[in-house]
Image (spheres, rainbow, N blue to C red):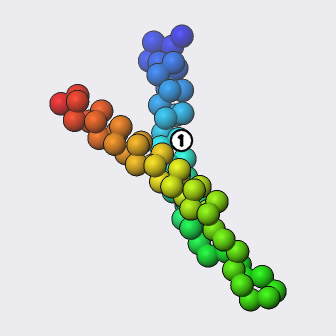
Amino acid sequence: MNTWINLNALWKIVVVGTLTGAGLPALFALGLRALSPPPRTPGGETTAGALGYTVAVVCFAIVLAAVGWGISVIVGHS
């Protein structure tokens, strides 16, 4: 263990930073993609998007929960 660099804290920071810095925006983008209109079938009608709405709701709920948790951590440590 180096006395200048705490490797245990460093890997935790990298993992949390990656999850919140890239993971949450990617999850939000996945939710938006699930809400986009499905492609039209050759007959001209669109297919039902119930699964897309469910995926979007789950994605947005996870993102909102992470934002709420982050705010509660910031407020709780002041």
Badge 1, how many Cα within 10 Å: few under 14, some, many 20+? few
Mark 1 secondary-structure assignment: helix
Q: Position of residue 36 (x, y in %)?
A: 59, 72
From this view, report whether residue 38 is shown above or below residue 74. Answer: below
Image quarter where the N terminus lies is top right
Q: Position of residue 44 (x, y in %)?
A: 74, 89
Q: Position of residue 45 (x, y in %)?
A: 72, 84
Residue displayed at 66% across by 71% down: 48
Q: Is residue 21 visible?
A: no
Drawn side of residue 74 relative to residue 54, left or right = left
Q: Is residue 32 visible?
A: yes
Give the quadrant of residue 43: bottom right
Give the quadrant of residue 49: bottom right
Q: Please tell me how many numbered marks the rendered image carries.
A: 1
The residue labelled by disc 1 is 18
* Residue found farthest to the right: 42
From this view, report whether residue 60 is shown above or below residue 3. Answer: below
Residue displayed at 69% across by 80% down: 46
Q: Nearer the viewer, residue 51 or 13?
A: 51
Drawn side of residue 64 relative to residue 12, left or right = left
Image quarter where the C terminus lies is top left
Q: Nearer the viewer, residue 13 or 67?
A: 67
From this view, report whether residue 40 is shown above or below residue 58. Answer: below
Q: Amino acid at mark 1?
A: Thr
Residue displayed at 54% across by 65% down: 32
* Residue found farthest to the bottom: 44
Q: Position of residue 22 (x, y in %)?
A: 53, 49
Drawn side of residue 74 relative to residue 67, left or right = left
Q: Nearer the viewer, residue 58 or 43?
A: 43
Q: Nearer the viewer, residue 42 or 4?
A: 42
Residue displayed at 34% across by 39% down: 70
